[in-house]
Amino acid sequence: MRLLTGATGHAGSIVLREFVRQQIPVRVLVRDPGKAAWIRDLPTVEVVHGDMLVPESLTDAFDDVDRVLMISSPRDNMVQTQCRFIDAAQSAGVGHIVKFGGKESGTTFDPNAFRGTRWHLEIEKYLENSGVAWTHLRPSQFMQFYLPGTLTGVDPHRQALVMPISESRLSPVDITDIAQVAVAMMQAEGIEGKAYDLTGPEALTMTEITDRISEATGRTFRYESVTPERKRALHAAEGLPPEVLDLLDEIYRGRLASPDSRVDLGAHREFGVEPTTFAEFARRHAADFTVGNGNGTRR
Ligand SMILES: NC(=O)c1ccc[n+]([C@@H]2O[C@H](COP(=O)([O-])OP(=O)(O)OC[C@H]3O[C@@H](n4cnc5c(N)ncnc54)[C@H](OP(=O)(O)O)[C@@H]3O)[C@@H](O)[C@H]2O)c1
């Protein structure tokens, strides 16, 4: 049996839908039953309740499981959450954990300067020393984070993408590509002890991103370049807590300091996944990028 955690989140929900699309049986660990109503109706999915931070709640989740895809929230308790989960998996005799991490695509991005990347590296090391076979999946920025309603998405009312990263390029990747790679990894032989970076197929400036959204929607979106201080003030006005402001500030400053990005399609090629371009992503989500389609509020 395969086990997936984080299925109620941004990335995990799309990974789960890929399991279902391919009719591959999977068990999902859910901590909040209220968020799992839509999951219970899916065929080929078994739902178990438990909390990654509470080892004694995980007995049913690990029963007869040979491989886990481990995803949790990019919050300040991510290291504790995933390390406790690794310990519990090891005790239960789980053979292999695929860790869903993250890696900035910037060519000179300093991993130590950004706490999200530091956390993932710390967990990767912990997993490598746990005695459980491991594989690291390290996607770059999600394309979905340009959609309205996300912390870093476009403002559909003003048809603007407000960012403090000047002309830096990023190589965002569609979560549906990551999901296809992740599901293939959950079936593949011979991937133990390997790390896979995963980006989208192009390194794009924010102007190129908004041009593609404009082409897809038939409306003019523009990039509004602001200072990190201004962006922080805008996020603060949205009510974000100080720790999230600090986290975002680090990411933006890192991207500003590392203006060029890599493109790495090695995992796409190895697992036979066609890379989605940002133009294709924008066309698929054209309705989501415009107001009046239920996505006009930012969260
Ligand atoms: N944002 C990006 O562009 C990007 C790029 C590359 C990699 N990443 C990485 O991708 C990962 C997933 O991000 P995301 O945006 O999908 O996160 P998310 O939307 O916050 O989802 C996290 C999931 O983990 C679950 N979870 C958290 N703590 C748990 C616990 N103690 N027990 C059981 N389940 C728990 C959450 O359950 P609830 O629904 O109950 O909260 C949710 O299902 C993160 O590690 C992030 O660093 C992000």
Image (cartoon, rainbow, N blue to C red):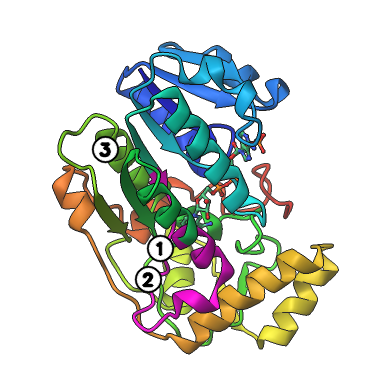
Q: Quadrant of the N terminus?
A: top left
Q: Earlier in the sequence, mark 2 or mark 1?
A: 2
User: In which image quadrant can residue 49 be found?
Assistant: top right
Q: Which residue is mark 3?
A: 185
Q: Within 10 Å of the Cα at label 3, are there few (<14), some (14-19), or many (20+) other Cα atoms?
A: many
Q: Earlier in the sequence, mark 2 or mark 3?
A: 2
Residue depicted at x 36% and y 59% = 279
Q: Within 10 Å of the Cα at label 2, are there few (<14), some (14-19), or many (20+) other Cα atoms?
A: many
Q: Is 94 in front, or is 297?
A: 94
Where residue 65 appears, as percent x and y from the top left, is 38, 20
Distance Cα–Cα, label 3 vs label 1: 20 Å
Q: Is residue 8 visible?
A: yes
In the rendered image, the vertical position of residue 83 relative to residue 102, given as above or below: above
Q: Which residue is mark 2?
A: 105
State which mark lies toward you, 2 or 3.
3
Q: Is residue 109 left or right of residue 85?
A: left
Distance Cα–Cα, label 2 vs label 3: 21 Å
Where residue 72 appears, as percent x and y from the top left, is 56, 43
Q: Magenta stretch containing residue 105, yes or no?
A: yes
Q: Which residue is mark 1?
A: 172
Q: Is mark 1 within 8 Å of ligand 1?
A: yes
Give the quadrant of ligand 1. top right
Q: Is 99 in front, or is 282?
A: 99
Which secondary structure lies at badge 2?
loop
Where residue 58 appears, as percent x and y from the top left, is 57, 23
Residue depicted at x 58% and y 69% = 115
Residue type highlighted by circle 2: Ser
Look at the image and give the residue range highlighted in magenta. Answer: 99-121
Q: Is 187 in front, or is 210?
A: 187
State which mark lies toward you, 2 or 1.
2
